[in-house]
Image (tube, coloured by chain):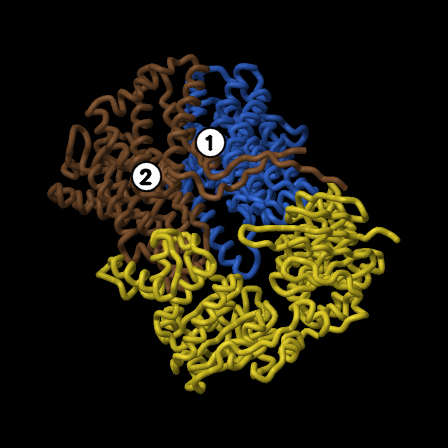
Chain colours: A yellow, B blue, C brown
């Protein structure tokens, strides 16, 4: 039997505070599309980065065609025939398609006409439609992804790693990608396909390896032998019954947040939120489920005033704030926990006090001066009420742990007695205690009559907390579920439904 | 050419355009060097200092050896050598490019003054002679302006073509441009970001040094304190005016060279306009171009290298 | 194959910057000594003379203080802009235009009593500097034009504006045809407070202290810190980035322009293109060495001033005063090296590829 194209054996990779891979293994045969499955945080991307030379594994062996290798840079891995298409593309926007494709692997004298022809021929061989002379900045995300794949093919990569490739694709483009991958394996190359979308895996892939908690739980299972349900069970572990964490005490009241036909166009000119409407009433938690990158961030940013709405309206507690700035929205009763806590919600290099008063400092004026006595009093009150563990008030915010950062941020936002809380991925990356504390605070807020809009990629969390679950896909709400009646599978289908 | 055949106005016109070509050569060499450095993503505000170093070493090399060619070579090497300091500080060590570049200007001006102290009133000269292009230099007026210039001017044209070719038609140039646009992309594609950038800064310094040496072996023909007279800053402006492209930089050099030439040659034309106001033009035009570029950048990528001024360090692991 | 890599230390060495500065100073003095030795100059005599003439006596110390004023104010101007991550490379031009505005006031009110005229001229200087920086500030805030280049270009414009005035409208009628601007009114001279030190020393110290205090105590300073830390966070907190950018550039320009007014009332008798003498550029290096902290700016400015004053004195020994410029630049390069060593450690890493 011919040796495996790729063999990862007992890979360990630790980062400060996190073990991303704990002895993960993977064997990929040439001529197959091999899925690497797992939930967010299962260690898929880290494992692939070890293979692609981005990270040096702490322990374990990498074998290519039976030979043990050690890569110190992506260039080394490329030279050994391993190409990786990252979720964030590595392209030069001002260069043409052809220039990007040949970068780093071009003949010393460039005959652009000849190169353009060769790139076009290469694209055609694999069934791409690519104009080699177009600058990359004019391309859609799907087209850019093809340039990335062409880059690997130009270097004659024997192994191509694709990290969640369909996240940026339209359904049509995803089908086309599948066809391209088939052609590649026909040439006896190997494709590693990282995903958590089961429908794609079952339609594109030959074999699958499932990771959970940084280790391999199922290696090289033939797709033909399993169904999506079995794969899902392997990914999430034994499906323990999800029970509601805190059943609603009261009945939902007045509409606190009213989003009407909201459309948001992102910086690339693409429609991120597409005529979306939703309501959040006082005393309810509305959960938004969906695969990352389906417009969730643009939606919450537009509600908070960080992103401008192209059309539609946002009403908070009866007042139309569509045109208002962030400050007016907060004054109308909005609290916002952004997805990017350190980059948007906090100033990591500044002291804890500065961060604590970010919403309320205007009430601490003494003429042109800021009363630091009042600021410190406010900060210490916040810290004790929300049980934030802080060294000194003057310590930079970044010195706090993730859970404490989020507690301070949430506490600060809740201290203004909001009527509606928009919380985007509020528990992501926190430890168990942190997750519990944040969830508890949100439920408590709901029970006190606040409306909560919660965006989470963790479906279990939404099933446990939400009173209603809306599923978002491609900028639209595609379904609404009652978490007490809907099954995980039903909601999951709706999440990926639009992509199938 | 026999001057008596020409009218006074014709002589003045020739003088104006001959000076334009001289200044344009000077600005183009330094501007081309800065273009190469900035295309790799490194802003070098040390041009004025590197030029001064080139001027003093060009003069010393010239008069001590008796050959302006030796002077030009020595000045070029000296410019590249002092640029290595900026390359080390701003590229290898990741210091702020603005601060390091300005310190390089200070150091270059100071060193040039110090080294040139004994040569300030040196009566010796090592000057380039004009080279007449056979046949063409006899053309009335045009011949005097275009085909009877110093060999450095012809060399600058050749260097410009080479630079254009390397930037746009070789894999090294493609890598260099990628390094300036997106260092992480170039790194992932296997190009050495630090190596490329340091190389570009040193080549840029060598060209600025050559420009300075040309000043002291031809345009002014001597060394004196302050001989660069702020022309290094015009070269920095020129790169922006020329949208970081060698061809446009050359065109800009002619325009800016013309404004420099005009300053001392307005009177013969009976123009009653202050030459000093003319001398503001390159800077104001550059600001204008920069504003236009920024407005346009809303709909299309700016011609400015996207990674300009940003130190690169591969993510640590 | 082995290669050297820089790795960031978990936390930068404490008190690193003063040490880096001292290291830079030592680096510069050694570099200067090598240079002087090569050219056959007496190293110790030169350094002794520089010390004598900058810190050797009360008289020279006071002169050093005077020279430190424009350096410190230019450094302060640069560090004000840096609070928002902006580079004001135009302090030189703002100093010049500030001095021009002050001269203008002196020309239209030549007969005002001294104290009133001085105040009016200083205010005009600050306003002039602010105006000179306002354009780049607006261009940056509204259309995103790099303030580095615009402020740099305006330096050269300011120089030429003064040369223009020198030869035309403001040419001194008593200058025997020499192109110079008429002297400022005699009564518009800053008072002497100690030995040769003029009032500007106190004013500069007060400004530096006031800015430090205002940054830490005021609502504006708080908002500035948030805005400087991240534009997204500022927008989230409801702080207008545009207004902050324009305001900070204008304030930075005002401080630099003010320095021009002080030079005109203190060390100079008339406006000329040399009134700034590179203070704007040196100020950038001063601010960088001080890590943009106002208190540090004062200390570094004093050291640079001593080098400059000392440098002028060594010409009588037959040594070029350019030594001073070289030393100032070398301090910065030395400090860059030292700062890198304090934040990073250099390791040898194996680079093996087996395929």
Residue at the farthest left position: C113
Residue plotted at (76% across, 58% down): A191
Q: Position of residue A461 (x, y in %)?
A: 54, 72
Residue A5 to residue A427: above or below: above
Q: Position of residue A248 (x, y in %)?
A: 47, 82
Would you say the residues marked 2 and 1 are in contact, meaning their CB atoms lie under 8 Å apart?
no
Element marked by disc 2: helix
Q: Position of residue C347 (x, y in %)?
A: 57, 35
The residue mark sitting in front, 2 or 1, is 2
Query: Along the line of sight, which residue is nearer the eye, B193 or A11?
Result: A11
Counting labels gives 2
Categorize mark 1 by other alpha carbons within 10 Å: few (<14), some (14-19), many (20+).
Answer: many
Q: Which residue is mark 2?
A: C296
Residue at the farthest right position: A1
**As drawn, is A59 to the left or to the right of A433?**
right
Residue plotted at (41% across, 78% down): A450
Q: Which residue is mark 1?
A: B49
Q: Position of residue A296 (x, y in %)?
A: 54, 71
- The chain that hosts pointer 2 is C
Residue C165 to residue B52: above or below: below
- The chain that hosts pointer 1 is B
Q: Quadrant of residue A255?
A: bottom left
């Amino acid at each position: 039997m011919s040796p495996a194209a790729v063999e990862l054996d007992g890979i360990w990779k630790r980062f400060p505070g996190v073990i991303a891979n704990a002895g993960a293994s993977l064997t990929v045969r040439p001529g197959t599309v091999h899925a690497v499955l797992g939930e967010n945080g299962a260690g898929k991307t880290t494992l692939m980065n070890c293979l692609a030379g981005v990270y040096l594994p702490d322990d374990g062996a990498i074998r290519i065609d039976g030979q043990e290798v050690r890569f110190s840079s992506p260039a080394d891995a490329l030279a050994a025939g391993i190409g990786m298409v990252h979720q964030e593309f590595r392209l030069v926007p001002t260069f043409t398609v052809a220039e990007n494709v040949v970068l780093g692997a071009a003949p010393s004298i460039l005959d652009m006409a000849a190169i353009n022809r060769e790139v076009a021929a290469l694209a055609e061989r694999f069934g791409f439609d690519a104009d080699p002379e177009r600058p990359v900045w004019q391309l859609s995300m799907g087209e850019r992804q093809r340039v990335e794949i062409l880059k690997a093919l130009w270097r004659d990569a024997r192994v191509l790693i694709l990290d969640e490739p369909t996240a940026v694709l339209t359904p049509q483009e995803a089908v086309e990608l599948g066809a391209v991958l088939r052609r590649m394996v026909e040439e006896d190359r190997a494709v590693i396909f990282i995903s958590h979308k089961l429908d794609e895996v079952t339609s594109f892939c030959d074999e699958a390896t499932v990771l959970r908690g940084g280790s391999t739980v199922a290696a090289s299972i033939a797709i033909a032998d399993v169904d999506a349900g079995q794969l899902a069970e392997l990914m999430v572990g034994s499906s323990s019954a999800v029970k509601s964490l805190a059943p609603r005490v009261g009945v939902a009241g007045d509409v606190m947040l009213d989003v009407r036909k909201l459309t948001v166009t992102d910086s690339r000119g693409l429609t991120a939120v597409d005529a979306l409407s939703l309501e959040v009433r006082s005393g309810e938690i509305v959960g938004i489920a969906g695969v990352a990158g389906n417009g969730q961030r643009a939606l919450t940013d537009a509600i908070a005033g960080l992103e401008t709405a192209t059309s539609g309206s946002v009403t908070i507690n009866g007042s139309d704030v569509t045109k208002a700035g962030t400050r007016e929205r907060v004054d109308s009763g909005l609290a916002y926990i952004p997805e990017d806590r350190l980059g948007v919600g906090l100033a990591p290099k500044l002291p804890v006090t500065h961060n604590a008063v970010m919403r309320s400092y205007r009430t601490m004026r003494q003429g042109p001066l800021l009363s630091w006595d009042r600021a410190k009093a406010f900060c210490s009150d916040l810290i004790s009420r929300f049980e934030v563990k802080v060294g000194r008030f003057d310590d930079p915010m970044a010195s706090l742990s993730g859970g404490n950062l989020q507690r301070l941020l949430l506490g600060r936002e809740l201290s203004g007695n909001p009527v509606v809380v928009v919380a985007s991925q509020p528990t992501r990356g926190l430890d168990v205690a942190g997750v519990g504390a944040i969830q508890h605070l949100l439920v408590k807020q709901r029970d006190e009559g606040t409306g909560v809009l919660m965006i989470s990629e963790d479906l279990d969390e939404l099933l446990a907390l939400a009173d209603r679950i809306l599923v978002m896909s491609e900028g639209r709400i595609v379904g609404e579920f009652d978490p007490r009646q809907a099954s995980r599978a039903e909601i999951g289908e709706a999440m990926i439904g639009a992509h199938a | 050419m026999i001057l008596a055949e020409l009218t006074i106005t014709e002589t003045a016109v020739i003088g104006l355009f001959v000076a334009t070509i001289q200044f344009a050569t000077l600005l183009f060499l330094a501007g081309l060097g800065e273009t190469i450095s900035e295309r790799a993503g490194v802003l070098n505000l040390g041009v004025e200092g590197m030029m001064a170093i080139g001027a003093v070493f060009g003069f010393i090399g010239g008069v001590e050896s008796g050959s302006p060619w030796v002077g030009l070579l020595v000045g070029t090497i000296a410019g590249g050598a002092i640029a290595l300091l900026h390359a080390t500080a701003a590229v290898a060590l990741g210091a702020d490019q603005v601060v390091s570049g300005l310190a390089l200007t200070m150091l270059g001006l100071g060193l040039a003054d110090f080294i040139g102290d004994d040569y300030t009133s040196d009566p010796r000269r090592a000057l380039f002679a004009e080279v007449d292009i056979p046949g063409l230099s006899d053309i009335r007026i045009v011949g005097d302006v275009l085909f009877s210039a110093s060999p450095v001017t012809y060399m600058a044209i050749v260097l410009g073509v080479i630079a254009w070719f390397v930037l746009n038609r070789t894999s090294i140039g493609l890598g260099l441009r990628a390094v300036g646009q997106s260092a992480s992309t170039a790194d992932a594609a296997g190009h050495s970001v630090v190596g490329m950038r340091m190389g570009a800064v040193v080549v840029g310094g060598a060209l600025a040094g050559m420009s300075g040496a040309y000043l002291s072996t031809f345009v002014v023909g001597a060394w004196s304190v302050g001989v660069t007279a702020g022309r290094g800053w015009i070269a920095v402006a020129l790169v922006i005016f020329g949208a970081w492209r060698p061809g446009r930089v050359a065109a800009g050099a002619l325009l800016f060279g013309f404004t420099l030439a005009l300053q001392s040659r307005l009177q013969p034309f009976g123009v009653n306009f202050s030459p000093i106001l003319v001398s503001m033009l390159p800077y104001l035009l550059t600001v204008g171009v920069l504003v236009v570029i920024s407005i346009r950048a809303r709909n299309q990528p700016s011609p400015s290298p996207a990674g300009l001024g940003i130190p690169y360090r591969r993510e640590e692991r | 194959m082995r290669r050297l890599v820089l790795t960031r230390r978990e936390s930068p060495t404490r008190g690193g910057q003063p040490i880096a500065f001292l290291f830079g100073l030592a680096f510069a003095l050694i570099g200067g000594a090598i240079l002087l030795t090569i050219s056959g100059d007496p190293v110790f005599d030169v350094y002794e003379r520089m010390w004598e003439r900058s810190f050797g006596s009360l008289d020279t110390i006071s002169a050093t203080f005077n020279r430190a004023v424009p350096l410190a104010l230019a450094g302060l101007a640069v560090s004000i802009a840096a609070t928002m991550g902006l580079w004001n490379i135009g302090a030189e031009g703002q100093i010049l235009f500030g001095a021009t505005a002050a001269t203008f006031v002196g020309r239209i009110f030549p007969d005002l009593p001294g104290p009133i005229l001085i105040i009016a001229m200083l205010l005009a200087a600050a306003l002039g500097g602010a105006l000179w920086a306002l354009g780049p500030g607006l261009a940056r805030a509204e259309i995103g034009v790099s303030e580095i280049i615009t402020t740099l270009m305006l330096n050269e414009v300011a120089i030429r504006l003064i040369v223009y005035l020198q030869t035309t409208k403001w040419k001194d009628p008593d200058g025997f045809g020499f192109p110079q601007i008429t002297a400022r009114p005699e009564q518009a001279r800053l008072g002497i407070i100690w030995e040769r030190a003029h009032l500007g020393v106190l004013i500069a110290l007060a400004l530096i202290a006031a800015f430090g205090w205002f940054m830490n105590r005021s609502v504006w300073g708080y908002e500035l810190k948030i805005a400087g830390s991240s534009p997204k966070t500022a927008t989230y907190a409801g702080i207008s980035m545009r207004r902050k950018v324009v305001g900070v550039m204008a304030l930075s320009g005002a401080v630099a322009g003010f320095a021009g007014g002080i030079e005109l009332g203190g060390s100079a008798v008339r406006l000329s293109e040399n009134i700034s003498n590179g203070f704007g550029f040196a100020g950038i290096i001063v601010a960088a060495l001080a890590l943009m902290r106002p208190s540090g700016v004062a200390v570094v400015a004093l050291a640079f001033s001593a080098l400059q004053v000392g440098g002028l004195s060594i010409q009588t020994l037959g040594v070029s005063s350019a030594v001073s410029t070289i030393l100032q630049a070398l301090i910065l390069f030395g400090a860059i090296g030292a700062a890198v060593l304090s934040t990073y450690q250099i390791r040898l890493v194996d680079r093996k590829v087996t395929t």
